[in-house]
Image: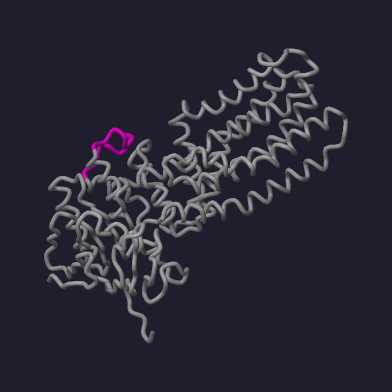
Amino acid sequence: MGESPSGLSVNSISCTRGYRELFSELNFLLEPGHILRVEGKNGSGKTSLLRILAGLAQPVDGQVLWNGQDIKSPEACYFQNLFYLGHKPGIKYELTPVENLCMARSLFGFARDNGIEDALYQVGLYGFEDIPCAFLSAGQKRRVALAQLLLTRAKLWILDEPYTSLDVVAIAFLEGLFKKHVHNGGSLIITSHQPVEIADCQLRRLALPATQLEEVH
Amino acid sequence: METTLSSAFWALLKRDLMLAYRHRNELLNPLFFFILVVMLFPLGTTPEKQLLMTMAPGVIWVAALLASMLSLDTLFRADYEDGTLEQILLSPHPLPVLVLAKIIGHWLVTGFPMILLAPLLGVFMYLPGEGIVTLMLTLILGTPVLSLVGAIGMALTVGLHRGGMLLSLLVLPLYIPVLIFSANTVGADMADMTIKGQLYFLSAMLVLAITLAPVATAAALRISLE
């Protein structure tokens, strides 16, 4: 390959579950500043695709490149640039929100050292910092995990159903965050059953099992 | 803030110890099991001093081995279920080092208390003073091997819903050399024989396990989470 494209490029990947083929020969390039929304029925392979893109699972065939280099190679620095949040909460219920975010900071390295309290304030968890997450509601737990978005320096966010159990206010807040991230040159891959309406952003759609992207705006 | 590998290592170790402290009741189970098994032996066999003394090293070590295996489930299971294990895998830091932090945390709350309990159990079983010292020495060298080797088995079975039986089948054969050398060391010491050879062997196993087990565990976790 001559010049290396910046962003995340997916080269003819295939994925199977058991004997069933979920998708094959999937190709796309996601440049910085773009949002990709992955759609599809239940069981169409949305989560499988996201796990492959996050490097947690291996595609049967094909490869995933970050700035032209394989995501598994150390030169790509992919994992310094990735924030992934799956279906599972990704936080410890026995720990308080502050302790959870401190742990995430040590694992991933956040931009600001003392931004944790501030991030919790912004996601509306002011006054809940020192309460173990087990005592928080489902939506509040989700907010703890999503507070990491305010702190991370990652360029690529991969979020699997981020709106689950969030209220209208939190969803609007999250969409504001997405917009800011994309305008700062970040990119975002998201699955959601709810419509994603983010004004003046480059939004693309991948409807599995189709293998091509569609431009929305 | 730039995060360093050592800060991630210590944060993970601290987190695991904090979680263990918040679940301290669960933590006591393997230790109670360890004490109970040893205490039942004099009741089940005979309280005769000579016989108990000969059996003591083997009995205490078998109990330690089973207690350690019982506690393996706490190593990765909870992290797997709540998705924090995924987050650890996605960290830019080398996974074997992070895994080692988790294994050390596990050993500190299971293996280490067993070393402290050993003198008490030695007294139950009429072990003489020097026998108890040797027993503790073998536990110091042996219990970390149990945690390290057990971690590989646990990492391989963490994705299975009922991996308990498989875990024992995987891990027990690897525990047996530790059991044989450790029990033999204490027995040989009580018979006034030299124990240098056995201790060297146990130390070699420990060095081997520390070097290789974290790498193998990390690889096994990547397979299990796929």
At 42% from the left edge and 71% from the top edge, which residue is drawn?
A76
Q: Quadrant of residue B66?
A: top right
Q: Residue furthest front?
A: A19
At 15% from the left edge and 45% from the top edge, which residue is drawn?
A167
Please state if B14 lies on the left or on the right of A23 as rendered: right
Please state if B225 lies on the left or on the right of A165 as rendered: right
Q: In which quarter of the image is residue B50?
A: top right
Say which of A77 and B45 sits in front.
Answer: B45
Please state if B33 lies on the left or on the right of B85 as rendered: right
On screen, residue A102 above or below A50: above
On screen, residue B42 above or below A145: above
> Residue B184 placed where, x, y %?
78, 34
Say which of A89 and A60 sits in front.
Answer: A60
> Residue A59 placed where, x, y %?
38, 65
At 73% from the left edge and 28% from the top edge, which residue is drawn?
B57
Q: Is residue B155 magenta?
A: no
Query: Which range of residues does the magenta coloring cover?
Result: A124-137
Q: Is residue A126 magenta?
A: yes
> Residue B70 placed where, x, y %?
54, 33
Give the quarter of the figure containing the N terminus of chain A. Answer: bottom left
> Residue A170 placed where, x, y %?
17, 48
At 44% from the left edge and 54% from the top edge, which residue is drawn?
B89
Count numbered badges in the picture.
Answer: 0
Render colour scheme: one colour
Q: Would you say the magenta stretch is mainly helix, strand or loop?
A: loop
Please state if A34 lies on the left or on the right of B107 as rendered: left
Give the quarter of the figure containing the C terminus of chain A. Answer: bottom left
